[in-house]
Image (spheres, rainbow, N blue to C red):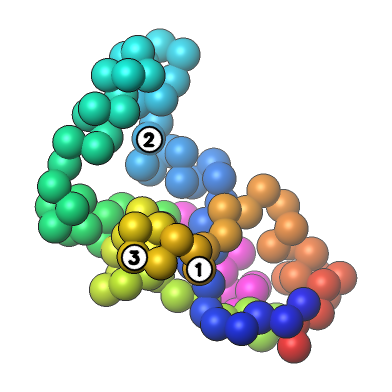
Amino acid sequence: MVQRSSTLVLTSATLIDVTIKGLYAEDGPPVDDADIINMSIPNPVAKTLQIGATAEMMRRDSELLRGLTTAGFKIDSGPDGAGLFMKYLSRGGGYYIDIGASHLIVDGKIKVI
């Protein structure tokens, strides 16, 4: 695999648990209401909230992130440490929500060059 720039990597389970658990859930509010709640936070406030959330997600996924770094994969935490949401808003990419492929990099089954 050729990695052109650093990437924010989070597991899907951690992302859901820390950021949207309960908001987008079977027993949560209707999706229209959840969308309004989620998008009603002004971006500067959301960025501040995301810095803490990103730190917690990276703490929870620290073993995986250490393994990726050891394998030569460049990791980052988004603009000013504000994570996936701010990366999405600022550049529309540069993140990966892991559902298992990162372990192939950690295990050396996918090489990073």
Say which amino acid is labelled 2: Ile
Q: Mark 2–mark 1 contact, CB under 8 Å? A: no
Say which amino acid is labelled 1: Gly
Q: Magenta includes 50?
A: no
* Residue highlighted by disc 1: 94
Note whether 22 is above or below 4 in the view shown. Answer: above
- Provide the secondary structure element on which disc 2 rests: helix
Query: 10 Å neighbourhood of mark 2: few (<14), some, or many (≥20)?
Result: few
Q: Left or right: where does residue 59 sit relative to residue 32?
A: right
Q: Residue at x 24, y 27 (%)?
A: 36
Q: Residue at x 37, y 19 (%)?
A: 31
x, y percentage for residue 112? 74, 82
Q: Magenta stretch: give its range.
A: 59-69
Q: Residue at x 46, y 39 (%)?
A: 16
Q: Left or right: where does residue 66 sit relative to residue 29?
A: right
* Residue highlighted by disc 3: 90
- Between the C-alphas of marks 1 and 3, the distance is 10 Å
- Between the C-alphas of marks 2 and 3, the distance is 20 Å
